[in-house]
Image: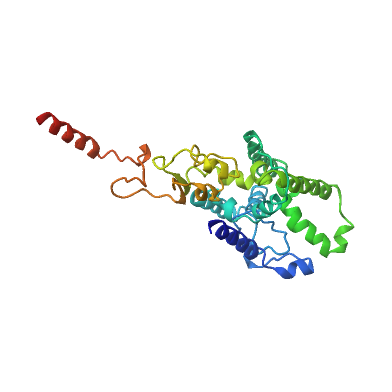
Amino acid sequence: MKSLKRKLIQWTVLVLTNGNLSGFVEGTIYKGPLKQFCVPGLNCYSCPGALGSCPLGSLQAVIGSYQYNFSFYVMGLLLALGVTLGRFVCGFLCPFGLIQELIHKVPSTKIKPHRIYGYLKYVVLAVFVVALPLLAVNFMGLGQPAFCQYICPAGTLSAGLPLLLANPKLRSVIGGLFSLKSAILALTILGSVFIYRFFCRMLCPLGAIYSLFNRISLYQLQFNEKKCVHCGACAKACRMDIDPSEQPAALECIRCGDCVKSCPTRALKAGFRFRPKGNLSEKTPYTMSSCNRCGHCAQSEKTRHDGRAST
């Protein structure tokens, strides 16, 4: 049931964020008032069906321009989503993440990549989203959205290809840049067949941003060590190759909930984390972060010790 709910949420987000169906027929881009707002996941601004803006595209536009009208809005949105949800956005609210999951269902040998490749997305974030739009400027001092222009496979799939199919005139001006991006898209599709969420793991700068908040976000994967029997079922169920019993707040965790479903003792749960009230119970095991230094435990221990001494 939890898997079904997650899929329903993913499909709902995909449909709602790309509801301009006439754009696919006419080969046009929606430019109405909703385009002032960013969607949480990776969804290209130029997609004919897109009703909102991509946060990465908006961030690059802000960095590379003189006018910072939406800088606080874009950064505020990313910070709010990161602090509240972390990479829950990747697992539930990103249309391109859903597309990769569907591609991964193609029968093939599945590969678990080394974790070191996961750091590539931070390099992409630093170079193509921040450095190049800020430093590589034209004669007017304006930077280009380098990630969108040279890499983004989501834009090629959802915007470039549909617009070319609907507009014959655009096909006559296809150049080397589109060939490069098509090759990156082909690599992403091929990689997604063999590696679960290939692009999310290795290249997505938006996932890199949200991952920085995974350890402090309100929505957390919570682990109860007292209930754990160390069967390893959660690690086997995790398609992002994480051991939730060791790293419940891992940077790569997309909060999909597969580990929660697999746990036979319910030692894992996903939800919003708040400080527990009252006495700590088995469901809220003691951690140093939950101690408020009230001294009640020391006092009760002294009382027990005095009682044993008097008898």
Q: Position of residue 21 (x, y in %)?
A: 71, 69
- Residue that extends furthest to the bottom in the rendered view of this protein: 22
Q: Quadrant of residue 94?
A: bottom right
Residue at 36% x, 42% y is: 285
Residue 142 visible, this orientation: no
Q: Position of residue 87 (x, y in %)?
A: 56, 48
The C terminus lies in which quarter of the figure?
A: top left
Q: Position of residue 220 (x, y in %)?
A: 47, 48
Residue 262 visible, this orientation: yes
Asked whether 31 or 66 is in front, the reply is 31
Residue at 30% x, 41% y is: 292
Q: Is residue 87 left or right of residue 164?
A: left
Q: Position of residue 15 (x, y in %)?
A: 65, 64
Residue at 76% x, 49% y is: 185
- Residue that extends furthest to the right in the rendered view of this protein: 172
Q: Quadrant of residue 155?
A: bottom right
Asked whether 38 or 266 is in front, the reply is 266
Q: Is residue 199 left or right of residue 211?
A: right
Asked whether 39 or 62 is in front, the reply is 39
- Residue that extends furthest to the left in the rendered view of this protein: 310
